[in-house]
Image (cartoon, grey):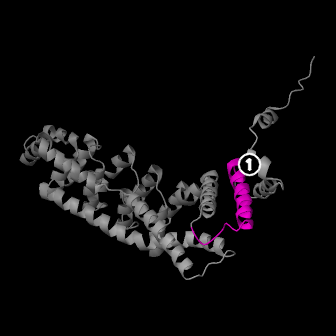
Amino acid sequence: MTCDTSPPDGDKKADEAPNSVIKKVFDQFAITHIFKKIIDKTSWKATDQLNDAIVLFIFLFVLFYGSQQIKPEFSLAVVTLIILLIFIIVEFVGANSPYFSRLFFSEEKAEYFIRNLESYKTPEVERNLSLLTFSPKNINSLLSVIQSNKNKVHPYVTDRILLYNPLSSENLDRVFNIDLLRSNLRRDLIIDLLMKYENRLSPENIENIFVVFENDEQLIKTLIATQIDSETLLATHPNCPILEESFKKYHKNAETKSKIFKLITKTQTNIVTYRMIFCLSFWAVFWGALLLLLNYLHLINNISFILIIFSTFFISGLVAAFVIKPIVDKIVNHWIDTSKLKFFELL
């Protein structure tokens, strides 16, 4: 009988792990070891890359400060430190993404919000609608609440959740259930969903919408224009002139079909993407202008500069968000509304 004297798998992996040059050269005071011990006592996580970046940041800061290279201007030293700081923040958020995901995208949190909507004040409702992401399971719960008591959930809340969260096939089947269509959903919401889920509704969904809104000419035309499977209605309702005319106009005419496709695409503009683009651009401009102003007024000295640059980095981001968000929202919403009007004019 022989004994296995080889080290455990964990030790093998540790031995085989590549040595960090940064840790060996710059971490003479075992900063990463101290940092790791502190982190291990919390619920946070720190990757080797994060530890190395922190060590490198401290080393370069001491080096640049000692050689008087940290000055109130965009020098190579300052830019290097800023890039390292951004990397540290991104790496920390990435390493702890499950926590941040739970903070904003928790299914349980969204479920609690739906079940206790009546207890929330209006500002709290707005905040939760902005921060929470609702899963298909959450949306099914919302639809169950609406179906059991339509007065428990304000139509505005229903509109926001159904329009700004992806719906599964099961969600769509429940939304376009005859009972729900008849009494619990706004007409405009139905039109918006028809555009958002172009050509994705089942024949049963289409039939239910037609039965409920048979006398609403604009909605029926929207249904035909947005759903290719609306052709099934021609078989189930053979003596309906509006169906034959609309299907021929919106699906057999290539030019009209192309115009409809382009207008529907415009109505689906992702407002969040534009917010990010303009906010980041404004953030960079504002930050640069603020630093130049402080430099011009001689309000920055070598000792306080790095603290000021860190604070302006975050303050300018908040200012960008507050200034740009309402402006972008207004412009993009106007773009979407104009596209919708053109779509309805085409019907």
Rendered-image quadrant of the C terminus: bottom left
Secondary structure that dominates the magenta span: helix
Mark 1 surroundings: few (<14), some (14-19) or many (≥20) residues within 10 A: some
Q: Please provide percent x and percent y for residue 281.
A: 43, 64
Q: Nearer the viewer, residue 286 or 339?
A: 286
Question: Residue 48 colored magenta?
Answer: yes
Q: Please provide percent x and percent y for residue 130.
A: 45, 65
Residue 125 visible, this orientation? no
Q: Left or right: where does residue 1 sit relative to residue 277?
A: right
Please determine whether, in this image, residue 15 is positioned above or below residue 212.
above
Residue 218 visible, this orientation? yes
Q: Left or right: where does residue 336 sit relative to residue 152?
A: left
Q: Nearer the viewer, residue 289 or 177?
A: 289
Please determine whether, in this image, residue 165 is positioned above or below residue 151.
above
Q: Please provide percent x and percent y for residue 62.
A: 74, 63
Q: Left or right: where does residue 229 sit relative to residue 66?
A: left
Q: Amino acid at mark 1?
A: Ile
The magenta-colored residue range is 45-73
Q: Which residue bears the numbered disc 1?
A: 22
> Furthest residue to the right?
1
Q: Nearer the viewer, residue 115 or 6?
A: 6
Q: Residue drawn at (55%, 56%), measured in percent from left and top?
A: 108
Rendered-image quadrant of the N terminus: top right
Q: Please provide percent x and percent y for residue 240.
A: 8, 46
Q: Residue drawn at (83%, 54%), measured in percent from left and top?
A: 30
Q: Count of labels shown?
A: 1
Q: Residue drawn at (24%, 48%), measured in percent from left and top?
A: 208
**Which SS class for mark 1?**
helix
Q: Nearer the viewer, residue 225 or 260?
A: 260
